[in-house]
Amino acid sequence: MIEVYDLHKSFGKLEVLKGITTRIDRGEVVVIIGASGSGKSTFLRCLNLLEVPQKGEVIIDGVNITGRNVNINLIRQDVGMVFQQFNLFPHKKVLDNITLALLKVKKINKKKSRELALELLHKVGLSDKADAYPRHLSGGQQQRVAIARALAMRPKVMLFDEPTSALDPEMIKEVLNVMKQLAAEGMTMVVVSHEMGFAREAADRVIFLDDGVIIEEGPPEQIYNNPRAQRTKDFLRQIL
Amino acid sequence: MTFPDYSVVFNNWPFLMRGLQVTLSVSAIAVVMGFFIGSAVGLLRLSRVKPLKLIAGAYVEFIRGTPLLVQLAILYFGLPSIGIDLSAFAAAVIGLSVNSGAYVGEIVRAGIQSVDKGQMEAARSLGMNGHMAMIFVILPQAFRRIIPPLVNEFIILIKDSSLLSTIAITELMRAGQHIRARTYADFQIYTAIAVLYFIVTFTLSNVLGVLERRLQVSD
Ligand SMILES: Nc1ncnc2c1ncn2[C@@H]1O[C@H](COP(=O)(O)OP(=O)(O)OP(=O)(O)O)[C@@H](O)[C@H]1O
Ligand SMILES: [Mg+2]
């Protein structure tokens, strides 16, 4: 589903990704962990070209998105993204947040877009919030709308960048539950998160990223219980 | 000190009102044109096309770095000597619009840049191209933030239009100067003019203030 070969990304002189190679299968749920500044977000953002890597390849569903002559807008429709800060459109109602790209990008008619949006709002448990503005919603509710908005494009992959780290503890669960449900439905997911409960329950694989390289990857039980590398052990000791 | 006799103002009231009318109509035209120029300039300053960006930047810097009085003099007194004749009215409108456009351009640019960068990323991650994201996501949000400084700029423009008195436009200020030349009632005339400017700007800022609050409530 996603193949990454020797991915390099620098900001000026700062080399953030120093050659990342991995593959993510269809339906797989991968959790990425690592210290602040280790390049987790940058890696994720290279997967939908919000950051353009200097070297290496990203192949999504057979399409080399780092190649020339790719229509990035088309590819991004297949790769949903959920941000730490939700990034809902504050000037649009919840329903319109979800339908905007359906109407303008997919050119689906109003009635169908609305139906799809309502269906997705139901899925994330927010049917009653269709006509509210984002600022009247709690953080957890906003993040669930953001998930619904990304899902509306019917993506093949969903990327989550610390989706719960801006949330109060009591709201984390409601967002994780939606994500677990998605995972159970077979969505391919790449999740940057330190929520170990989620990783243990929903992830097929955990990747530990440090200083721009993959130090270790494996099933959650192995990474959390028997990390092989010393750096993984040190890191886990810090977050536990 | 003597108590000033304001009858001179009321005796010349129709003439003053005609001046005020000119002030208002020239300002209105310049506000609209300045807004269009400024919107274009603001967008160009953020464009990725280097030459356009540079030209827009140079325009803003030049206008902001030189006095309006001098800009008007160039248009009305300078251009004829190289064979370009502008009517006083054309020079006035062009001068004010081009001047205001630079300031509005900065307001528009700042408004767009004040929108959180996550908004563009969210829009792009949904497959919108840059233009769609700008039109449907960034500009509507920028617009709300632009309104207060824009109102401020409009008010400055109305006050600056008094400089048109130097290029043979009989707007409010020059109308007053004419009356003064006949009556020597400097104090009465100039205070009356100040009050008239104030009534216009005060009304405008209040009316637009109400509009602005309406817009904020409805979002
Ligand atoms: N647009 C950018 N310009 C310059 N430097 C950047 C940019 N984005 C990220 N960096 C730098 O790259 C490094 C890695 O950033 P990244 O956001 O990928 O880390 P992260 O692992 O997601 O960290 P965190 O856990 O804090 O989110 C950091 O040192 C960061 O300052
Ligand atoms: Mg990050």
Image: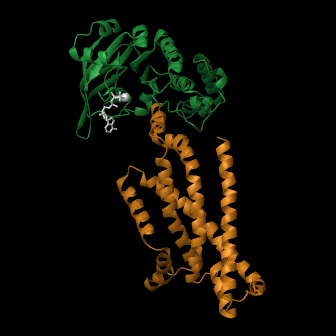
Chain colours: A green, B orange
Quarter of the rendered structure image containing ligand 1: top left
| Residue A205 visible in the shown view | yes
* Residue located farthest toward the front when viewing the structure as drawn: B1
Front residue of B37/A136: it is: A136
Q: Which residue shows up at 40% across the image and 20% down it? A: A191
- Percent coordinates x, y for residue A80 in the rendering: 46, 25
Above-or-below relation of A217 to A128: above
The quarter of the image holding the N terminus of chain A is: top left
Front residue of A67/A229: it is: A229
Left or right of B87? Residue A83 is left
Left or right of B207? Residue B96 is left
Above-or-below relation of B32 to A189: below
Q: Quadrant of residue B194?
A: bottom right
Left or right of A9? Residue B179 is right
Q: Which residue shows up at 76% across the image and 82% down it? A: B13
Q: Quadrant of residue A107?
A: top right
Front residue of B16/A155: it is: B16
Q: How many marks?
A: 0
| Residue A27 visible in the shown view | no
- Percent coordinates x, y for residue B43 in the rendering: 47, 53
Above-or-below relation of A33 to B218: above
- Percent coordinates x, y for residue B166 in the rendering: 55, 83
- Percent coordinates x, y for residue A11 in the rendering: 28, 38
The quarter of the image holding the C terminus of chain A is: top left
